Amino acid sequence: MIKNSFISFQEKKEENRGAIE
């Protein structure tokens, strides 16, 4: 469950990076 939240956080982080670039 915690691992899932961490993965979701990483995915959002990648999406934000893609949006900025």
Image (tube, rainbow, N blue to C red):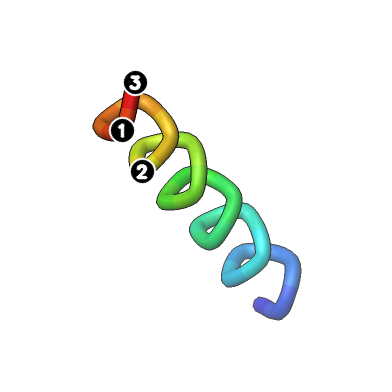
Residue 19 versus residue 15: which sits nearer the camera?
19
Q: Secondary structure at mark 2?
A: helix
Q: Is residue 15 above or below residue 3?
A: above
Q: CA distance from mark 2 to mark 3?
A: 9 Å
Amino acid marked by disc 1: Ile
Q: Is residue 9 above or below residue 1?
A: above
Label 3: which residue? 21
Question: Which residue is at a point 67% across and 65% down the rendered structure image?
Answer: 6
Q: Which mark is residue 16?
A: 2
Question: Which residue is at a point 61% across and 64% down the rendered structure image?
Answer: 4
Amino acid marked by disc 3: Glu
- Quarter of the image where one finds residue 15: top left
Question: Which residue is at a point 71% across and 79% down the rendered structure image?
Answer: 2
Quadrant into which the C terminus falls: top left
Q: Is residue 9 left or right of residue 3?
A: left
Number of other residues with Cα within 10 Å of mark 1, as a class: few under 14, some 14 to 19, many 20 or more: few
Residue 10: % across, % down: 59, 50
Q: CA distance from mark 2 to mark 1?
A: 6 Å
Residue 3 versus residue 10: which sits nearer the camera?
10
Question: Which residue is at a point 66% across and 77% down the rendered structure image?
Answer: 1
Label 1: which residue? 20
Amino acid marked by disc 2: Asn
